[in-house]
Amino acid sequence: MAQPSSRQGLIDYGLRQLGAPVLEINIDDDQIDDLLDDSIQVFNERHFDGVEEMFLKHEFTQDEIDRGKATSETDATTTAGIVTTTGTSTTISGYGTTTSSFVENSNFIQIPDSVIGIEKIFKFDSSSISGGMFSIKYQLFLNDLYYFNSVELMQYSMTKSYLEDIDFLLTPDKQIRFNKKQNRLYLDMDYNSINAGDFIVIDCQRILDPNTFTKVYNDPFLKMYFTALLKRQWGQNLIKFRGVKLPGGLELNGREIYDDGQRELDAIKQKMQLEYELPPLDFIG
């Protein structure tokens, strides 16, 4: 089918683009599976349709809080809260061995493998500005907005912006660290400010599983990229037979097939940066 909806359907599509079944495509099945896995990985990591924005909710447990509140490596309540890293140098003349120790909070939240990026976590702690029925925002609605058109929209908007500025200064955003190779979310915050049962909301990007969302297999970029990988692999397999004469005087030219596949990949990667990737954020100042 011209519109593949399965893994095997995309494999058959790529082989047909190279001439199968009219031509014999000299690629092993294991190589094809590897190339398809590589193509899907590039699609998930570089294509704007390869991920979905997701808001994951996490409830803190008492064990996580105890690890975050640990004050030493020997604290009986933790095995991963505080870690000390030591650096040793023996190159300073006249001083012998110099040792420096660094303490860090290694408490983390394990993130699912499907998450490849985290933007931020939303505020979860209440404050006198925005939390509870005695907050300023609640009183504003209770006393000043008892009926519509009681205040000007411009005044209301300016008041809300002012309250948000105060809230940001009093309860700033929590600092986070995340690396998709670790699948660990580190929260650099005071764990004494949270209780067991509190939630955080994680703004993240989660990859689209093509086995669940089968339209991924019909994506134009994925089809082009996978076909170009097949062509390059086909040429690479035939390079070692260069100069070998076939019946009828034909000669295999794996180098030309390989070069064609590489040129197609280079063109696709350049097009990917212009059309398929999300633009990077601008940093000013």
Image (spheres, rainbow, N blue to C red):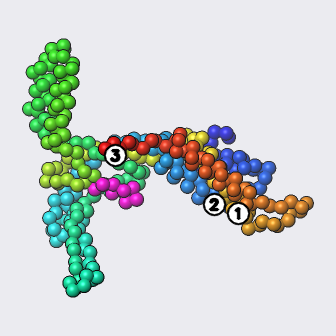
Labels 3, 2: front one:
3
**Image mark for residue 31:** 2
In percent of width and height, residue 64 lies at 22, 57
Image quadrant assignment for residue 185: bottom left
Image quadrant assignment for residue 90: bottom left
Q: CA distance from mark 3 to mark 1?
A: 42 Å
Q: Tell me, yes or no, whether the two marked residues, 2 and 1, touch with CB atoms within 8 Å.
A: yes
Question: Tag 3's secondary structure?
Answer: strand
Q: Which residue is mark 3?
A: 119
Residue found at x 57% / y 41%: 219
Amino acid on which disc 1 is placed: Asn
**Mark 2, other Cα within 10 Å: few <14 / some 14–19 / many ≥20:** few
Which residues make up the magenta segment?
Answer: 177-186
Compared with 69, 22 (above or below) is: above
Q: Is residue 167 left or right of residue 206?
A: left
Image quadrant assignment for residue 122: top left
Q: Which residue is mark 1?
A: 237
Question: Tag 1's secondary structure?
Answer: helix
Q: Judge whether residue 56 can be spotted in this image.
A: no
